[in-house]
Image (cartoon, rainbow, N blue to C red):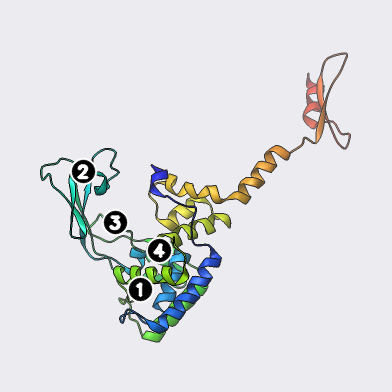
Amino acid sequence: MAHEAIKNLSAYVKYEDFLDLEQLAKDLEEDCALKKAREGDYSLLVRLLFFTGARISEIVGVPRRVYTQCLFPGNRKRKGNCPKWSVAKDDRICIDEECRFFSTYIQKYHHGIRVKDIAFKDRLIAIYGKSVKTEELKPRTVVVDQKTLDIIQEHINRYSLKPDDKIINLNENGAKVFINKLKKESKIPWLSAHKFRHGHAIYCIQNGMDIRTLQLQLGHTDLATTAIYLQFAIDDRTKVYDKVFSAKPDYIKLQCPSCGFQYKIKKDGQINLEDKLKTIFD
């Protein structure tokens, strides 16, 4: 259900938070814990997370992985909810090899955002979804602001990146390590990569983006998942509510005591045209 797809929207990255986190990322680049990260990768990752609403795996890419899950009704595909699953190293395995609820699926490799995935003229970036189910990678496109594109272009020129090169030289694990470091240094206990995605969606809704456009931006299959963010469009809801309940008619209704005919008189004293025609033809 939609309310299960997105949870805990009480905490999300606001625009003011993003500005602070972007600056903090720039400061952390001076003491990179990850040697593979280039200067500018951290701050650009933070910017792409907030201004595209993309998942961290969609930005930096993911390797080919095999996932296991429990499809027992009520477990919501969570292995930890099933008593037949036991801990093995850093994962869980099912002790019942013949269980009909045991399921596996393969997440195909995809490369993340490359130089050739960006259409600078159209301000579009090709984003590859979190679960690729076909042999051929088919991306969706997201719109991005001009400042972010300018920063990306500077990044490309600075490191002489080629069309097939990734924009950010981090893998998924490295990116998550950085986010955890950002969380620790910023002292924001709820910070995660997905909170940037929530912040992007809420910021878009609060600034007038329609729900269908937001669905395309986020890549949601079900519009109901995107519709959860509508609760944050408080200003729009207030305006519509006031328009409905504050509207007052610009006329008064009167009735002729002789014939019983009803008609409307406007504030300027004029009789409604429709009532005039009825008077003539009745």
Residue 159: percent from the left, percent from the top? 37, 85
Q: Nearer the viewer, mark 1 or mark 2?
A: 2
Cα separation between marks 1 and 4: 24 Å
N-terminal label among 1 and 2: 2
Badge 4 local density, few (<14 within 10 Å), some, or many (20+)? many
Residue 209: percent from the left, percent from the top? 54, 55
**Amino acid type, callout 4:** Ala
Residue 165, by quadrant, is bottom left
N-terminal label among 3 and 4: 3
N-terminal label among 1 and 4: 1
**Residues at discs 1 and 4 in contact (Cβ within 8 Å):** no
Badge 3 local density, few (<14 within 10 Å), some, or many (20+)? some
Q: Nearer the viewer, mark 4 or mark 2?
A: 2
**Residue at the extreme left of the image, as rendered:** 98
Cα separation between marks 3 and 1: 21 Å
**Residue at the extreme top of the image, as rendered:** 258
Badge 2 local density, few (<14 within 10 Å), some, or many (20+)? few
Residue 136: percent from the left, percent from the top? 25, 60
Residue where numbered disc 4 is placed = 193
Please indicate whether residue 238 sits to the left or right of residue 181 in the image.
right
**Amino acid type, callout 1:** Lys
Cα separation between marks 4 and 2: 30 Å
Residue where numbered disc 2 is placed = 83
Vertical relation: 93 (above or below) 162: above
Of 20 and 141, nearer the camera is 20
Quadrant where the image shows the N terminus:
top left
Quadrant where the image shows the C terminus:
top right
Residue where numbered disc 3 is placed = 131
Please indicate whether residue 104 sits to the left or right of residue 220 in the image.
left
Disc 2, SS = loop
The answer to whether residue 43 of the structure is visible from this angle is: yes
